[in-house]
Image (cartoon, rainbow, N blue to C red):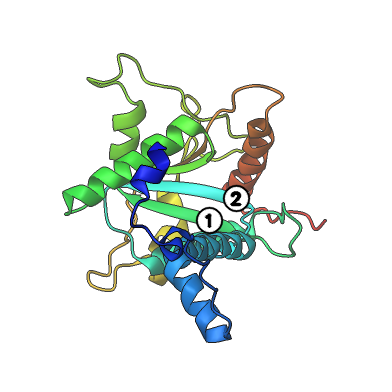
Amino acid sequence: MARERYLVGVSEEELRPDPKSEGPKTPKGKWENYWYHYKWQTFGVLAAVVILTVFIYQMATRPQYDYEIVMAVESYVGMTAQDRLKQELEQYGRDLNGDGEVKISLQTLNMSNSDPQMTQAAQTKLMVNLSTADVMFFIFDKPTYDLRFGQNEHNAEPISFFAPIEADDPGISPEWNYWNWKNSPLRTEPEMLSPYTQQPELPLDLYFGVRKATGSASKRTDTQDECLELLQNFITGTLPESE
C-alpha cells in the first residue's frame, strides 16, 4: 500500500528506466569517445614508451670502454690535451672486450673550478668513484693527492691507496706506488700546451696509479691487473703483444 501511495500521479512512462545510450558508430565518433575518457592515460603510456625507448637506445649505443680512468686536478685541462693523453694511453692497452679497438674513458674532474657548484660536483663525483671502487685507474695532481691521501688534518697518517707498479722507472714512488710523469716528454708536446700561454696544461707533478683491489676473487682484482699492465706499458713504452 505504501508503494502505491508514493506512485500516485506517476505515469507508466516515467517509471520505465532510461534506455541505454548507443555508443558512437563512426570511426571519428569512436575516437572522440576514446579520447574523452582515456586521454591522460594515453599520454602516460606514451611517455613511458618514449622513456623506455631512449633508455634502450642509450644502452645499445653507449661506447663499451676497455679501461676507465678518472683524472682529478685543480687546474683546467682543455679537450685537446685530454684527448692527446687518452690517445697515448690507448696505444699501450689491450682490446679487453673484443670489439676490435682499444677505447679508454677519461673522466677529468676540475677540483678547483671558478664556479663553486661545479667544484662541489667534481668533489662529489670523486668521492663516489673512491667509495664504490668501480674505477681502478686514477691520475691526481699533487694537491689533490695530498689532500686525499697525505698526512693532514683529515688523515692522521698517509693512506696507502695504490697497488705496486712492476716497472723500473725513477718516477715511481717505492713507498706509495704512484708514478710521477714529470720527466715524460708527453707533458710538453704541442698538443699538451695551452693555446693561450703555450705552457703545459697539466702540472709538472701528476701521479698515475692503480688502486689496490679488495678481495682476491673479486672482479676488481682482474681489473686491477689489467690497469696495472696498461700503466706499466705506458711508463716503459712497451706496446702490448698482439693477441
Out of 197 and 103, give the one closest to the viewer. Answer: 103
Q: Position of residue 30 (x, y in %)?
A: 54, 78
**Looking at the image, which residue is at 34% across and 55% down?**
202
Badge 1: how crowded within 10 Å, few (<14), some, or many (20+)? some
Read off the residue under disc 2.
Answer: 67
Disc 1 and disc 2 in contact, CB within 8 angstroms: yes
Please state which of residues 173 and 135 is positioned toward the viewer in this rendering: 135
Q: Quadrant of residue 26?
A: bottom right
Q: Is residue 40 left or right of residue 239?
A: left
Question: Which quadrant, please, contains the C terminus?
Answer: bottom right
- The residue lying toward the viewer, choosing from 35 and 122, is 35
Residue at numbered disc 1:
105
* Element at label 1: strand
Residue lying at 61% horizontally and 38% vertically, measured from the top left: 167
Direction from residue 70 to residue 230 in the image, left or right: right
The type of residue carrying mark 2 is: Tyr
